[in-house]
């Protein structure tokens, strides 16, 4: 489906981003796998892709920093001749109880979840526009449409991503670029491993079970990745500025 295409995946070394990287490679794309700080993590995903007969390159970049993003995109465009697909899957999930959240925690979530997505799109879109085509998928969350007690900063960053995508679609669609967002619900990833395994969170987990219509409270990363691949494909050519929920029914009602 993506033979001959180049995909840049931030947060591509773990969680949903890793699942996206693996599925893109299986569908013929050359995947630029970006880890935030540990090259070994990106190399491990690339090795897994290569073992399955796919093609990928590892990178490490702090995508919160414009200089790192510019260097990353410049290097990939120089080596590959362009970037056909961008997936911004880098993210962090931390509580932010009001009156007890330090500025460093707040800034980390804003910078990782929202700022980095904007910086990556800002760097990649001009090249896509020059070629008259491109596909971009950013990561929002079910927390962009429902409030989560004690996680107001996280919710706000994900809502910001959804509105950014809507606004950018108006700019980018005339240039042949599709930009959309995926809004997962609870998904079993390393980012929330502590939430799923810490006995202190039993009450929270029980509440999630009560509120989730599906018997599978935590989605598989591979399921979310499948939606990402659809949005990157020609079959989603009419979609611009959408945020697609995939949350086991969590946001469907009371």
Image: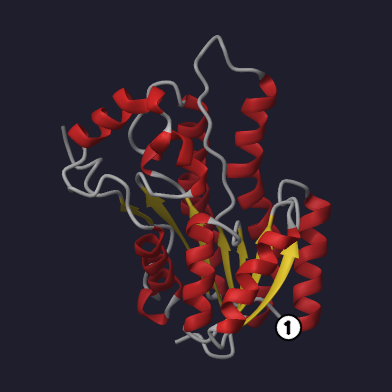
Question: Which type of secondary structure does the marked residue at label 1 adopt?
Answer: helix
Give the camera-side residue of 122 and 139: 139
Q: What is the basis of the colouring in this image?
A: secondary structure
- Is residue 125 something one can see in this rendering? no
The quadrant of the rendering that contains the C terminus is: top left
The quadrant of the rendering that contains the N terminus is: bottom left
Q: Residue at x 46, y 26 (%)?
A: 151
Determine whether, in the image, residue 34 is placed left or right of residue 65: left
Q: Residue at x 59, y 51 (%)?
A: 90
Q: Residue at x 24, y 41 (%)?
A: 250
Give the camera-side residue of 215 and 80: 215
- Is residue 42 something one can see in this rendering? yes
Give the camera-side residue of 140 and 164: 140
Question: Residue 121 location, x and y as percent?
Answer: 63, 59
Question: Residue 48 location, x and y as percent?
Answer: 58, 75
Total marks drawn? 1
Determine whether, in the image, residue 170 is placed left or right of residue 249: right
Determine whether, in the image, residue 232 is placed left or right of residue 172: left
Question: Residue 134 location, x and y as percent?
Answer: 56, 75
Question: Residue 22 location, x and y as percent?
Answer: 51, 73
- Disc 1 designates what residue? 80
Would you place residue 31 above or below residue 112 in this image? below
The image quadrant that residue 42 belongs to is bottom right
The image quadrant that residue 235 belongs to is bottom left
């Amino acid at each position: 489906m993506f033979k001959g295409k180049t995909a840049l995946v931030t947060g591509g070394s773990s969680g949903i981003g890793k699942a996206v990287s693996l599925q893109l490679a299986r569908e013929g794309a050359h995947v630029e796998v970006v880890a935030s700080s540990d090259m070994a993590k990106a190399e491990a995903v690339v090795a897994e892709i290569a073992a399955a007969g796919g093609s990928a390159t590892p990178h490490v970049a702090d995508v919160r920093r414009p200089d790192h993003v510019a260097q990353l995109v410049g290097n990939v465009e120089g080596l590959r001749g362009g970037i056909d697909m961008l997936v911004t899957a880098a993210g962090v999930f931390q509580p932010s109880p009001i009156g007890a959240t330090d500025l460093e925690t707040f800034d980390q979530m804003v910078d990782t979840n929202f700022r980095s997505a904007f910086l990556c799109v800002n760097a990649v879109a001009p090249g896509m526009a020059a070629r008259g085509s491109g596909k971009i998928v950013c990561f929002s969350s079910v927390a962009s449409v429902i409030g989560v007690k004690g996680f107001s900063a996280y919710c706000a960053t994900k809502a910001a991503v959804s509105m950014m995508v809507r606004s950018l679609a108006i700019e980018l669609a005339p240039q042949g670029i599709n930009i959309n967002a995926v809004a997962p619900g609870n998904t079993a990833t390393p980012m929330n491993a502590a939430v799923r395994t810490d006995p202190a969170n039993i009450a929270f987990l029980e509440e999630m079970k009560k509120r989730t219509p599906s018997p599978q409270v935590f989605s598989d990363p591979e399921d979310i990745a499948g939606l990402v691949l659809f949005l990157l494909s020609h079959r989603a050519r009419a979609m611009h500025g959408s945020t697609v929920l995939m949350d086991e029914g969590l946001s469907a009602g009371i």
